[in-house]
Image (cartoon, coloured by chain):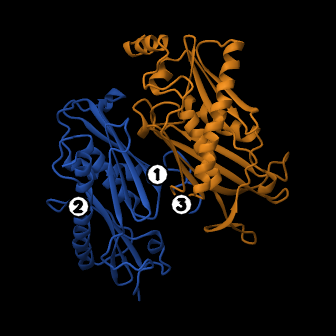
Chain colours: A orange, B blue
Amino acid sequence: MNILQKHIHALLEKDQRLDGRKFDELRKDISIECGISPKSAEGSARVKFGNTEVVAGVKFEVITPYPDQPDKGTIMAGVELLPLSSPDFESGPPSIKAVELARAVVDRGLRESGAIDFKGLCIKKEEKAWAVIIDVYSMNDEGNLADAIGLCALAALKDAKLPKYDEKNDKILYEERTTKGLSLKELPIPITVVKIKDKILVDPTLDEESTADSRLTVTTLEDGRVCALQKGGKEPLTNEDVDKMIEISIKKGKELRKILEKSVKEK
Amino acid sequence: MYKKRPDGRKFDEIREIEAKVGIIRRADGSAMFRIGKTIALAAVYGPRELYPKFLQDPSRGILRCNYNMMSFSGSGERVRPGGSRRSKEISMITENSLNPVLDLSEYPGAVVDVFVEILQSDAGTRCAGICAAALALADAGFPMKDLVSAVSVGRIEDKLVVDLDKEEEDYEVEGEVADIPVAMMPKTGKITLLQMDGICSKEQLLKVLEIAKEACNKIYDVQKKALMEKYQI
């Protein structure tokens, strides 16, 4: 254990965090900005959690629907942890951390929650449907990329407008955007909590992440139901831990939901 | 005849520019450079040890640039993630544009990484990337002989125009557009990048360099201002 981690432990004994927050307190400066790449992306957003920053963009493509879902479009999510955003990230194929974030936070959160009306993305049954492709990039990692990424993906999807589609010539007219957005039935909000010794902390900073024994990302719906879970870290969790973690996540999810809804409305 | 530019600019008028340094806290140096709708971000990491070891230069540090377009930053279809031949080439010419102003002799065996990401494109991304990268290197505090400023100059029919946007690059008359990206050390006017796509006469090319110089000076002023703003000079 390094000196900083020891210091974090010592502070926790006194019920304190390094940046002065309470255990169940999100960072104060959380901001969401939509339409950060409006010329090229059909939808885009930037999210900041303090100094942690991520950007996301949505592109549309026309695909042949999957044979088992002939009347549905689809969504694909990618997360890239850019070497631009941290000395710890390297160039090359997506790291396991990036894959986990893409699958667990974005993909699962969005798909399993039924957030997107996939039927509404069908252009012609068995022949043509829209694929929504969302790519999220880290810009500066100072902890809790997971929640920033999840929120940013939602904001970009909310911001998205379908391009025109020329059915006769099978061509997407990217220059001409329609007014039709994606109908999002749900906004699945991820909240990450970490356990350090016997304390549970929400929205961890980078130093808290590296000190954490275990972590749980809980994605919740508006009615408080949980739609995705992802546990990380080396140490196991007890039932009581999970209970506490989910409770905090539901409560904090509501706060984040308000911030998201407000930002999207302002736009 | 090409008489008027689609966005109403004069032939020698560059788009609006915005520059900011220190935008990425984890990086040793960073910058954002926007020209019109083209937005480039750059971050510098290093000097740090270079692996694999056989790439190391025992006499000096190495500059390594990586240019990448975010998947949603292209007009039209999604840009597939991962390197392409185009991005490799641009990474290399970015290195070549910046190397002449940098002195890395104090860092043998090390690498200085520059990552350039394009957030939105409307032509001129390589030049915007170079402008951002030069700022990020200056922000990181490396000894530099000069900054580097870059702009693309084009020929559309008989007109020489500065800083083409996408619409102009795709001008409908085939063979009537030439695109010439130029990077310069603004203090001396020395050229560190010169490429051309299309056809030009020698006379036209010499004129292009004059135009590029003038535009680079304007860009240089904005770059300097961004650096001074951060350090409140």
Question: Residue A223 at x, y = what percent?
Answer: 76, 37
Question: Residue A160 at x, y = what percent?
Answer: 63, 56
Give the chain of mark 1.
B
- Mark 2 and mark 3 in contact (Cβ < 8 Å)? no
Q: With respect to residue A170, does B101 lie above or below?
A: above
**Which of the pair A243/B81 is nearer the observer?**
A243
Q: How many marks?
A: 3
Mark sitting on residue A38? 3
Query: What is the three-letter code of the residue carrying label 3?
Result: Pro
Query: What is the three-letter code of the residue carrying label 1?
Result: Arg
Mark sitting on residue B85? 1
Q: Nearer the viewer, mark 1 or mark 2?
A: 2
Place residue B180 in its image quadrant. bottom left
Q: With respect to residue B38, does B106 lie above or below?
A: above
Local packing at callout 1 (Cα closer than 10 Å; few below 14, some 14-19, many 20+) is few
Lateral position of residue B26 relative to residue B76, left or right:
left
Mark sitting on residue B221? 2
Give the chain of mark 3.
A
Give the chain of mark 2.
B
Give the Cα separation between the discs numbered 3 and 2.
Answer: 27 Å
What element does badge 1 sit on? helix
Give the Cα separation between the discs numbered 1 and 3.
Answer: 26 Å
